[in-house]
Amino acid sequence: MLNRNIIEKVIDKALSNGADFAELFVENTFNSTIAFNDSKTKQNIVGNDYGAGVRVFYGHTAIYAYTNDLSEEALLNAADAVSKAAKGGNIIASIDLTNKEIENIHPIEIPNNTISKKDKIDFIKKVNEASRGYSDQISQVDIRFTEKNQHVMIANSEGLQVEDDRNYSRINVSSIASNGTEKQVGGEGPGRFAGYEFFKSVDPVELGKETARVAVTMLNADYAPSGKFPVVIDNGFGGVIFHEACGHSLETTSVAKGASVFAGKMGKKIAFEGLTAIDDGTMPNEWGSENIDDEGMATKKTVLIENGILKSYMVDKMGSIKTGYARTGSGRRQSYRFAPASRMRNTYIANGNDKFDEMIASIDEGLYAAKMGGGSVSPGTGDFNFAVGEGYMIRDGKIAEPVRGATLIGNGADALLKISMISDNMKMAQGMCGSVSGSVPVNVGQPAIKINEIIVGGRK
Amino acid sequence: MYNKEFKTIFSYAKDKTDEIEILLSAGNSFSVKINEQNIESFNYSDSKGIGVRVIKEGKIGYSYTEKFDEETFKHIVDEAIENAKYTEDDDVVIMENYPENTDSPNVYSKELDKVDVVDKIQLAKDLEKYAKESDKRVFNVPYAVYGDGKSYSRVANSKGLDREDIQNYAYAYIGALSAEKDDKRMGMDYHITRNFREFDPIKMAEESVKKSTNLLNAKPAESGKYAVVFNNEMMATMLATFSGIFNAKSVQEGRSLLKGKIGERIANEKVTIVDDGLHPNGFSTSAFDSEGYPTERTILIENGVLKSYLHNTITARKDGVKSTGNGSRGYKGTLNISTSNFIIEAGEHKEADLFAKHDKIIEIVSLQGMHSGANAISGDFSLGAQGFLWENGKREYSLKPFTVSGNFLQMLSGVEAIADNFKFDMSSNGASSILINELNISG
């Protein structure tokens, strides 16, 4: 993307005031979005994100600058600015980059840009028709078809130079059901680190119908009750509970500052003994997968919690410097506009030995969260909340009437210990995770789990 | 600025498109974050991007680039034309040379551009230092941040419209964590301004610490229905969360609660909500919107009655009204509608008076999960919250995290009193503390 000679000059310049480490990240990305609603293609936009970021470390201080101007002069200016922001003692001699070939563990079969817009729109229309055909109560269907081809180059003062291509494809569908006075939404957003073959793997009719089914079911449901209940959270996007309640607190970004409830807990029991949780960037072509992270390190499979014992944090380069733990290939960023930080990839709770039916049968009165909505957590305290997208009451050991509007609130550390059963139906779902280094694609996942007691905020 | 770029695109597009609009944004930003009196992170940026919106045979197409060269500029015009071919929207789009707002407030301070970086770093250091010193229960200050930025934007179309704007801002925020026994609570305070001398790190630090320590030693909330006071910051958050219901595009597409309700009473008569693109103290103040259309002060709800939606020129034409100057897009995006300075007007009560109106009141000072627990389409919300129990006008104790749930329109109808403590949040939403007759609390 850039002449090696220029890259070396930029890194040398960034180091020139005694920095411990310098890095250049260059990105050239093509984005394409088709937005569809009212049964019509409403908006079509394509574009090119293009820029570079220069980062240096002085001890525990990270300095970052970015620009869209990739001329030698502009890059040297950015490098000069970061080098002068602080002063260090180390003088690193001029560097010599070695191009590192990476193994492509997520091959792309059909690049997105080789498929005509018409084929994509035809696919969208099938989803739309299936949703609207499900029920007269479906009043609107919103569909977004997004593709992103990101080419990155990362070089640093340790002599690393590496490039990678990332191809993302996703379709987001939300169906709105209305009865004249009220509205409810059902949404799905499947996506993969892949090209057009992803869309061939999705059945547009099933996708449309499923979103419509959830919206209509929730429209015709009564409000959820309020109070403390046992809850069964099903697989797939149910994994958002672990992502929000625990995953963020296992990122060194929060651990290093002591702002995480899991700081200082390495090797200790932090969860139900049957719980094993993994963050894995190597799963072939999964939405949160990568070949290398945004610091140029090969991605890994990282066991976070094994049988309830904390085994690893998610560690980026600065996190490693601050905490002393080895990097886990977890340095990620949305784009050149962000310095990387430790982030999740495909994060899931591994299968346990319990059966879904036994979990439901074990509850006299409780909530079954078939589908979760989004959520958030305060890393300092571990307090979380998240919305139930499709919920049902459990009565006398059986799934009973649907309920809507439920929110689950609790504390991450506490909820991990209150998990009492883990089933064997692990499944993942796709999301965009927003944090200090921007919005990055991640998978969340889990088998169905039972939590003995959690606060349900409903309207009754 | 950027005359050459605009000229290149206009002249290439002249014979190929029916109409074209060019939007350019450029700017720089700075931020510094302090941890243990050291700089934890220090960021600058210098960035720009250009986006085009073309009309070809009545259809719209978009494209953008951050790469500035002649070949790429030509390419984005071609791409936008190609995109227009596949658009099926039948909205009528006409670009015009709209009239110009001539007396819009100044939103640029030359003085702010001259502040020395050393003073900026010191401010963030002081925030952390004073927060740690002010109370021994403070065990961590995860956020001690100063930042500023300058942004330039220019929009021009093939009908001769050409507007440009430059503005700047500076902000600081602090988050302090305090602990007592096993209870840990976070408190945040922020300030945004164009006058660097306004920053008062002692006051901000003490405020954030007080917000955090006040919440310690919490007792569980007893589930039930309560009268609720949202403080000014949280009322602004609620307002922002549901701002989409005023979006005329959402209304026309059948996804707003307010469809068909113009002229109807939808809130208590104490409620007046406005969107003011020309607010002198706002940080979303500009003489024109993303279409170059002049901005204005738009009354949305007046004494409880719905008066208007927020429009761009496309939705306005559909409804047979004038645009409210809320057309919104970044160079990377497509034309939509967004709020500018979005305000629920202040009342006359002192905040303390609100708490004397019921025997038992729950005060909400922190909300979580706005993007997941609030359904902007149905108006239903069920949110994680923190706050206090008041009895007989006295703050009794803080509450362990609880949920508050209800429906936004029912909440606006249930407004009993509005205080006079108006405040903008960091995102140009402004409100005062508000007493709501009844909401559901689950603890």
Image: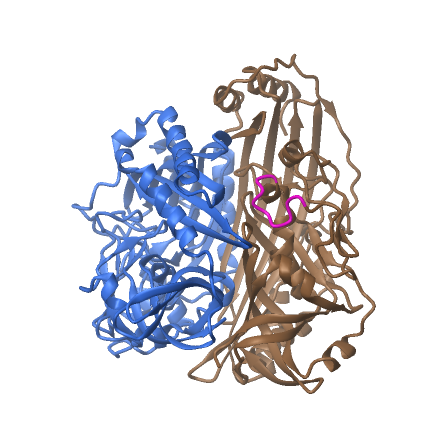
The majority secondary structure of the magenta stretch comes to loop
**Quarter of the rendering containing residue A413:** bottom right
Picture coordinates of residue B166, whole percent (x, y):
30, 38
Q: Which residues are magenta?
A: A256-264
Q: A273 left or right of A171? A: right
Q: A441 left or right of A139? A: right
Picture coordinates of residue B114, whole percent (x, y):
30, 26
Instruction: Tell which of B132 and A160 is nearer to you.
Output: B132
The colour of chain B is blue
Residue A128's place in the image compared with A220, above or below, is above
The colour of chain A is brown
Picture coordinates of residue A66, whole percent (x, y):
51, 32
**Quarter of the rendering containing residue B23:** top left
Picture coordinates of residue A138, whole percent (x, y):
53, 79
Residue beneath the point at 29% across and 34% down: B196
**Quarter of the rendering containing residue A452:** bottom right
Residue A79's place in the image compared with B384, above or below, is above
Q: A264 left or right of B44? A: right
| Residue B443 visible in the current orientation | yes
Residue beneath the point at 40% across and 72% down: B256
